[in-house]
């Protein structure tokens, strides 16, 4: 029996292409003493992986080596007293059908507490990022206005719901009329804008936010962020969780052009990377799980099936083909 893996064959230039990856075979791994043999079950694909591919988001992916991301795996064989066959775990693992691990960096999952996939989304890095970035940097208060870009994505949908829990008026920005409708009907956003059809994003935000914007949760960067920041009130806060609109740029953008606004509006703009907050994971996961159980949080997933669909799913993130969390079921 052969194992399968997906490697980075070429560093993407601009939009990633299927030819940047290669689906290859290798010998099955040998499960040694103290190790566990894992079978991948669900794989998370995320925009930040793009930076690892071109060397701007350390640790970078090496050419001709496996891509890696957050994976839920089943233990099919155990030589480790801390784990037993049939357990499910999550961790940063290679894009392989099977692999071994010493288990030190893995998290055991309770398959009865929530669907396994939720540990890649609302109860995983996605939910943790939404909560910590919004609460720590955004500091939402009752009655404030929160605008979320990339609002129909995995993080954005959760940010908007947490904003509502905290008593904010929430406006989402998405790329299709269907996503705009979903934000309001399923996720409780007060209003939403289709940035692809709005003739003037800055004006559209001003119309929907007559009292200005207090918090802008930035998942996309680019011209959308320019438009929202122009509408910020004094002492506005901007958690910058991503910049997907710029990840595939070939040429560097000039700017930023909005520094005068930062000065005279006393704005706080702060970058956020979830890896800087590991100590808070248990506390925040408990809160998210409580809200999920109480029905205050819901989530959406886009699931592709098949190991060979991993590159397609990743590329689909930059084409807006996901609603909520993009996951590949192996």
Image: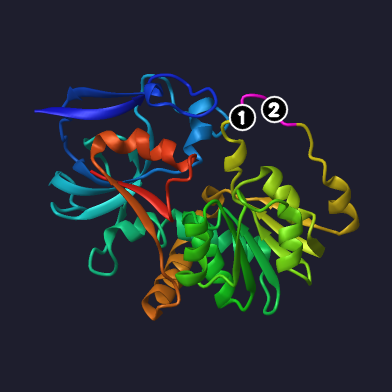
Give the SS element for disc 2. loop
Q: Magenta segment, principal secondary structure?
A: loop
Image height of 142 relative to 300, above or below: below
Q: Which mark is residue 156?
A: none
Q: What stretch of residues is rendered in magenta?
A: 249-253
Residue 326 position within the rendered picture, expressed as x and y whole percent measured from the top left: 39, 49
Quadrant (top left, top right, bottom left, bottom right) of the N terminus: top left
Observer able to see residue 235: yes
Residue 15 position within the rendered picture, expressed as x and y whole percent measured from the top left: 51, 29
Verify whether residue 33 appears in magenta. Answer: no
Residue that label 2 marks: 252
25 or 321: nearer the viewer: 321
Residue at coordinates 35% horizontally, 58% vertically from top-left? 119
Residue at coordinates 52% horizontally, 53% vertically from top-left? 176
- Is residue 10 shown left or right of residue 164? left
Image height of 40 relative to 168, above or below: above
267 or 14: nearer the viewer: 14
Residue that label 1 marks: 249
Residue at coordinates 28% horizontally, 59% vertically from top-left? 116
Verify whether residue 250 appears in magenta. Answer: yes
Quarter of the view holding residue 34? top left
Residue 187 position within the rendered picture, expressed as x and y whole percent measured from the top left: 48, 69
Q: Residue furthest right?
A: 264
- Is residue 151 shown left or right of residue 33? right
CB atoms of marks 2 and 1 within 8 Å? yes
Residue at coordinates 74% horizontally, 52% vertically from top-left? 227
How is the protein colored in the picture? rainbow
Observer able to see residue 269: no
Label 2 Cα neighbours within 10 Å, binned few <14 / some 14-19 / many ≥20: few
Give the SS element for disc 1. loop
Quarter of the view holding residue 46? top left
- Give the CA distance from mark 2 to mark 1: 7 Å
């Amino acid at each position: 029996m052969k194992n399968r893996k997906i490697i980075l064959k070429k560093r993407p230039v601009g939009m990633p292409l299927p030819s940047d990856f290669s689906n290859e075979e290798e010998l099955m791994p040998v499960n040694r003493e103290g190790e566990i043999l894992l079978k991948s079950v669900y794989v998370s694909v995320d925009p930040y992986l793009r930076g690892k591919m071109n060397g701007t988001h350390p640790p970078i992916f090496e050419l001709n080596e496996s891509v890696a991301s957050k994976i839920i795996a089943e233990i099919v064989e155990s030589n480790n007293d801390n784990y037993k066959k049939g357990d499910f775990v999550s961790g940063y693992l290679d894009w392989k059908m099977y692999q071994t691990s010493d288990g030190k960096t893995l998290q055991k999952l309770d398959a009865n507490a929530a669907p396994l996939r939720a540990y890649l989304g609302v109860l995983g890095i996605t939910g943790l990022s939404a909560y910590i970035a919004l609460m720590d940097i955004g500091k939402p208060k009752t009655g404030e206005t929160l605008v979320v870009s990339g609002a129909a994505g995995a993080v954005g949908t959760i940010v908007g719901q947490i904003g509502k829990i905290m008593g904010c008026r929430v406006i989402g920005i998405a790329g299709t009329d269907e996503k705009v409708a979903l934000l309001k009907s399923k996720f409780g956003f007060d209003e939403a804008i289709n940035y692809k059809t709005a003739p003037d994003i800055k004006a559209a935000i001003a119309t929907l936010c007559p009292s200005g914007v207090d918090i802008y949760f930035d998942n996309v960067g680019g011209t959308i962020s320019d438009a929202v920041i122009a509408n910020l009130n004094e002492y506005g806060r901007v958690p910058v969780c991503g910049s997907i609109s710029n990840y595939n740029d070939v040429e560097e953008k000039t700017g930023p052009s909005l520094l005068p606004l930062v000065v005279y509006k006393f704005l706080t703009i702060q970058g956020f990377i979830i890896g800087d907050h590991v100590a808070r994971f248990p506390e925040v996961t408990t809160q998210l799980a409580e809200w999920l159980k109480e029905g205050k949080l819901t989530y959406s997933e886009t699931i592709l099936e098949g190991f060979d669909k991993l590159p397609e799913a990743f590329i689909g993130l930059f084409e807006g083909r996901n609603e909520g969390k993009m996951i590949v079921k192996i």
